[in-house]
Amino acid sequence: MTLGYDKSLYVLAFDHRGSFQKKFFGVSGAPNAEETVRIADAKQVIFEGALKALGEGAPREAAGILVDEQFGADIVRKAKADGLTFAMPVEKSGQEEFDFEYGDAFGEHITEFDPSFSKVLVRYNTEGDPEMNARQSERLKRLSDWLHANGRKFLFELLVPGTAEQIEAAGGEEAYDTDMRPALMRRAIGEIQDAGIEPDIWKIEGIDKREDCEMIAEQTRAGDREGVVCVVLGRGADDDKVDHWLRTGAGVPGYVGFAIGRSIWWDPLKGYVDQTVGRDEASSAISANYRRFISVYNGG
């Protein structure tokens, strides 16, 4: 199949699981039935915000959501019935090392829900643990091969956390982010490609310099990968930082949009969960935040 994606893409991401249930509901480990209902209801509020955004001018052909099966199965079914673009995660939540949420049954779950994209979150530093990188690559190649053999699209969220030595050499986390991480991201993408892993869309951590966005996009399209694209992720940062990352990536050949989560829904949803904000007010604020980032990406 031809790799890549040929449209703009603005994803509202709320596939968070372990961190979501712990930080919003104080639930560690497997939630009970009552807790699961509360968590699923909170995710429903985010989805209601996405639907409001569509009704308030967000471009339906470019809009999308990213939500998990554990707490969002009903949301996914509604999105599918409504013809919305949606992605679902394949990875086990809250682990440093990528592994399958549903083990060998990953393909059955993907087939059942039929997402527009299957998504992985992967931490991969070429100067990190080589054995862990090798184990991850083996699993990711299995997934990549299965997805493309079955005519499905692959969304790859790449995180490149610095090693202690890298952060020290850079002079701190902030300097690592700006000065070292982009080149390490390019190397990681190259190694992942060399391992036979072929994403259609790369979900890329925010980058401060346009020339670094160009370098990353060029690497994702190296070889016969002209259709492969990048979207900017938000990292839960404040609006000013996310705005800067969006403006830096916007217009770079190969960049087509974003996948942002916490920066859109954290504050309104916290108000809803704490019962200081009503459901309608929370979903309206989520809609406004989502639409604002779309506007920023498009030069607003």
Image (cartoon, rainbow, N blue to C red):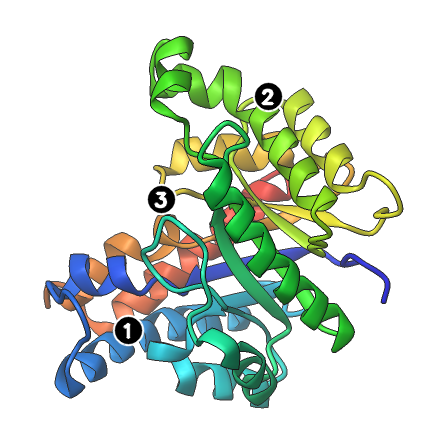
| x, y percent for residue 226 | 86, 46
What's under tag 1, amino acid-wise? Answer: Asp
Mark 1 or mark 3, earlier in chain = 3
Mark 2 residue element = loop
For the question of whether residue 96 can be seen, the reply is yes
- Relative to the observer, which residue lies in front, 123 or 37? 123
Q: Which residue is mark 1?
A: 280
**Residue behind mark 3:** 236
The type of residue carrying mark 2 is: Lys
Q: Residue beneath label 2, please?
A: 209
Residue 1 image offset from top left, x and y in percent: 85, 67
Of the numbered discs 2 and 3, the one sitting upstream in the chain is 2
At label 3, the amino acid type is Gly
Element at badge 1?
Answer: helix
Tell me which residue sits at (65%, 30%) in the image.
Answer: 186
Rate crowding at label 3 as few (under 14), some (14 to 19) or many (20 or more) other CA atoms within 10 Å.
some
Where residue 59 sits in the image (x, y, percent)?
63, 64
Q: Distance between the Cα atoms at labels 1 and 3?
A: 23 Å
233 left or right of 187? left
State the residue at coordinates (82%, 38%).
222
For residue 45, above or below residue 295: below
SS label for mark 3:
loop
